[in-house]
Amino acid sequence: MGLIVSALVCTHGARAETVSVAVAANFTAPMQKIAAAFEADTGHKATLSFGSTGKFYAQITHGAPFQVLLSADDTTPARLAAEGHALADTRFAYAIGTLVLWSAQAGVVDAQGAVLKTGDFKHIALANPKVAPYGAAALQVMDKLGVTSRLQPRFVQGENIAQTFQFVSSGNAQLGFVALSQVMMDGRIDKGSAWQVPAHLHAPIRQDAVLLKAGQGNPAAAALLQYLRGDKARAVIKAYGYSF
């Protein structure tokens, strides 16, 4: 953690730098707000790319010049560090994600999730569990509830959680497993109907940040990791339904 702690937040009087950030798709909205505040407060600019954690892993290991990874899990940053693509002592949990079963229509999803066993729907969306941690969590939930085999023919699989959300919001799938952050606004679910999945039904969605080798020596990269741990960033993160 020494690299982060020792990094001084840049002021407008100092030289501003740019940091290239790979951001898990579920964290799109909060990170857009945080990046704007980060630039206003420090002068540094964060260039954001959004996508699935699994795809980012493949890109980073093949030389993509990302400097910071905001993952949707904790295993990918640890793996990148073990393989020499990231600095292990910079890794920390910036958020704990919350999974929600959501429909854009009111009355479709009940508050206990019983619709998974009793509901009459054609399609249910989830992110690809092989590359998206929220998709893996969704599969764990359905396994524990004993409905996977019955629902599998109705699966509509998104490449990442952002595409999964689009399937549900457009009505192509009547309901689906998405991140709470995608449907929360001002501390409440903005529209439709939802079941906030109890945490004991799946492994914790611990989302880790890490400094990648390409960002070593970039003051903007170190400053961003420090900024994510500050009160202003954490207030945004909490407002989108994450915990710490």
Image (cartoon, helix red, strand yellow):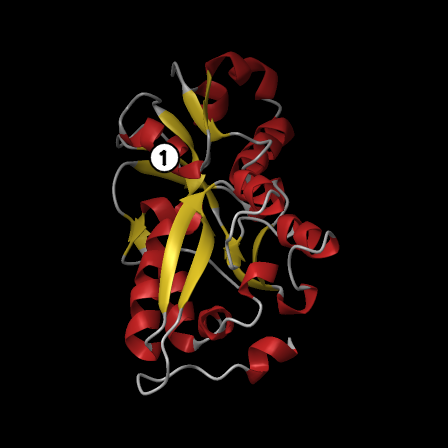
Q: In which image quadrant can residue 139 be found?
A: top right
Give the residue drawn at x 27%, y 36%.
192
Q: Please tell me whether mark 1 sits on a helix, a strand or a loop.
A: helix
Q: Out of 162 and 63, give the one closest to the viewer.
A: 63
Q: In which image quadrant can residue 35 be found?
A: bottom left
Give the residue drawn at x 31%, y 21%.
172
Query: x, y percentage for residue 73?
Result: 59, 49
Q: Out of 216 and 183, give the one closest to the viewer.
A: 216
Vertical relation: 17 (above or below) 134: below
Residue positioned most to the right: 82
Vertical relation: 19 (above or below) 168: below
**Amino acid marked by disc 1:** Phe
Q: Would residue 28 appear left or right of 141 to someone viewing this image?
A: left
Q: Out of 58 and 63, give the one closest to the viewer.
A: 63
Query: x, y percentage for residue 184?
Result: 32, 50
Q: Would residue 149 appear left or right of 99 to someone viewing this image?
A: right
Give the residue drawn at x 66%, y 52%.
80
Query: x, y percentage for residue 240?
Result: 37, 56
Vertical relation: 180 (above or below) 186: above
Q: Label 1: how many residues lie within 10 Å, few (<14), some (14-19) or many (20+)?
A: many
Query: x, y percentage for residue 243?
Result: 49, 61
Q: Quadrant of the N terminus?
A: bottom right
Give the residue drawn at x 36%, y 57%.
30
Q: Out of 205 and 78, give the one closest to the viewer.
A: 78
Q: Which residue is mark 1?
A: 165
